[in-house]
Image: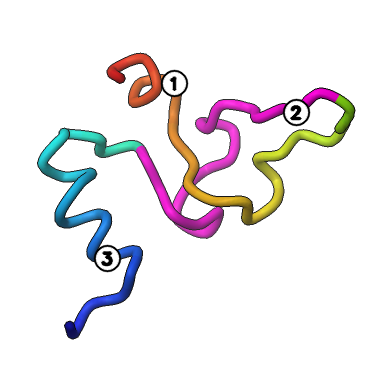
Amino acid sequence: MDCSHHQFIKEEILIPLDLNNTFSSLQEVDLDDVMSGYYVGIEEDMKINENGMLATAQDVEYL
């Protein structure tokens, strides 16, 4: 396979589902557009760490 894991997810899952505002890296998105993440007991906003995929409210609402 010539593409990266993230590229595969984008091409095979995100694009077919029209999830055009879901990203695999903080470098791909303006953080002001991404929903905040939280976990009970952790005060820091989880979106500022590379903890997995990020999505705008538009894509989260879509699902």
Of all residues shown, which one is farthest toward the bottom? 2
User: How far across and how far down the image is residue 12, in percent?
Assistant: 15, 54
Q: According to the image, label 2 marks what residue?
A: 39
Circle on res. 7: 3
Residue 54 is left or right of residue 45, and the answer is left
Dot 3: what SS? Answer: helix
Q: Are marks 1 and 3 in contact (CB under 8 Å)?
A: no
Vertical side of 36 occupied by 1: above or below: below
Mark before the other along the chain sequence, 3 or 2: 3
Classify the position of the N terminus by image quarter: bottom left
Residue at 89 percent of width and 27 percent of height? 41
Residue at 44 percent of width and 54 percent of height? 24
User: How far across and how far down the image is residue 21, in percent?
Assistant: 34, 37
Mark before the other along the chain sequence, 1 or 3: 3
* Res 9 quadrant in image: bottom left
Q: CA distance from mark 1 to mark 3?
A: 22 Å
Residue 11 is left or right of residue 38, and the answer is left
- Write down the region rendered in magenta: 22-40
Q: According to the image, label 1 marks what residue?
A: 57
Residue type, label 2: Tyr
Q: Are marks 3 and 2 in contact (CB under 8 Å)?
A: no
Residue type, label 3: Gln
